[in-house]
Image (cartoon, grey):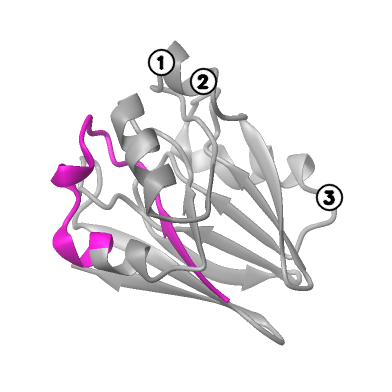
Amino acid sequence: MKIVIISDTHTDSIDNLPGRVLDELSGADMIIHSGDFTGKRVLDALRKIGPFRGVYGNIDGADVRKELPAIDIIQAEDFTIGVNHPAEGGSPLTLEPRLRPKFPRVQAIIHGHSHRTKNDFRDGVLWFNPGSATGKFPATKKTYGILTVDKEIRGEIIEL
């Protein structure tokens, strides 16, 4: 299973995503957006591409918030994945201690908010942040992520 993950797009149109990201999304078994869409048009466009899951971020308006949860738990093959932006915002330096209690029994935690990539296994959990697909500050580059799920779960960060 191939899951393409984007976050912190901060745009009102899917046309502002890099072409390579759009190509990857079209070939995905699942698309996950971990918050800060900024515009509902992006959410609507992602839903048209393929199987979609997402959470709202701290800057998403009521139109996105009424359609998505703040926290989602996804079953992918034999793995449980937690997704959270976090919608309450706060310091990006304290994300992990704030996120971990929300997901006591998962094998992966996907989040956004910091605009910085992360692909680390710790204590049996994959911590994954795809960064920002549009390179929105404070990101230093445009990035997205791919999770491959089969007998194990593996993350890959793609730099554009």
**Which quadrant is home to the C terminus?**
bottom left
Q: Is residue 91 above or below residue 155?
A: above
Q: Magenta region: which residues?
A: 1-22
Circle number at residue 61: 1
Location of residue 156 (image quadrant): bottom left
Q: Which residue is mark 2?
A: 65
- Residue 84 % position (x, y): 59, 40
**Circle 3: element type:** loop
The CA span between labels 1 and 2 is 6 Å
Residue drawn where x is 66% and y is 83% of the image: 150
- Count of marks overlaid on the render: 3
The crowd level at tag 2 (other Cα within 10 Å; few <14, some 14-19, many 20+) is some
* For marks 1 and 3 on the same chain, the one whose residue lies earlier in the sequence: 1
Placement of the N terminus among the 4 image quadrants: bottom right
Is 8 on the left or on the right of 129, as rendered?
left
Q: Inspect the image, locate mark 2, and give the three-letter code of the amino acid beneath it.
A: Arg
Residue under label 3: 104
- Label 2: element kind: helix
* Amino acid found under the numbered disc labelled 1: Gly
* Residue 11 occupies quadrant: top left
Q: Is residue 75 left or right of residue 70?
A: right
